Amino acid sequence: MKRLILTRHAKSGWDNLELTDHKRTLNDRGREACGLISEWLLINQYMPEQVFASTATRCRETWEHISKAMKCDAPVSYENNLYHSSPDIILQHLRNATFTTVLLTAHNPGIGEFAEKICSSPPKHQRFLGYPSASTTVIDFDINNWTDIIFGSGICRGFVIPSELK
């Protein structure tokens, strides 16, 4: 069995208009959301062993805040092509995973589309298809190797948005 923790980056700010989209940082709400998601992951014993993240500052910060709160030192690969990636690119990255439990953080619309395509049956949650900032889905796969992952094969074990955790 393999497990994927799929987290959209937390809320970022637009207050510094001199920053490019790639360099936008998390705002206070985003940092708070990372703490809430970290608690939820810990309570449910969802501890990543390997991480893939977009190189965008808001994705880097999302993982840094989550990992610090969880005291998780999983190896992380920051990947430029996860920046505004398609579901197919996300799938390619997961096929390179080597650990049992992997966390991947990236951007909408790709991460939301990927979440919808990878699950055999998406969660019955009114916000799932919109995949808001810091949304997190835990998906299990009945495979022995990540190279065997295909769309429609994941079993959704949980989906949460930070506002539900306050």
Image (spheres, helix red, strand yellow):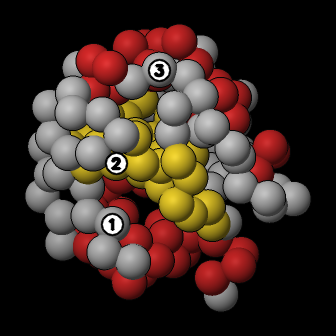
Q: Which residue is mark 1?
A: 46
Residue 87 vs 15, above or below: the answer is above
The answer to the question of whether label 2 and label 1 lie on touching residues, with beta carbons closer than 8 A, is yes
**Which comes sooner in the sequence, label 3 or label 2?**
2
- Residue in the picture at 42% in, 48% down: 140
Q: Is residue 1 at all visible to an observer of this figure?
A: yes
The answer to the question of whether label 1 and label 3 lie on touching residues, with beta carbons closer than 8 A, is no
Measuring from the top left, give residue 15's x and y in whole percent: 70, 49
**SS at circle 3:** loop
- Please state if 78 lies on the left or on the right of 120 as rendered: left
The three-letter amino acid code for the residue at tag 2 is: Arg
Mark pair 3, 2: CA separation: 13 Å
Q: Which residue is mark 2?
A: 3
State the image quarter where residue 147 is shown: top left
Crowdedness near tag 2: few (<14), some (14–19) or many (≥20) residues, C-alpha within 10 Å? many
**Which comes sooner in the sequence, label 1 or label 3?**
1
Q: Which mark is in front, 2 or 1?
A: 2
Q: Which residue is mark 3?
A: 150
- Residue in the picture at 56% in, 70% down: 33
The front one of 67 and 149 is 149
- Residue in the picture at 39% in, 24% down: 149
The front one of 23 and 135 is 135
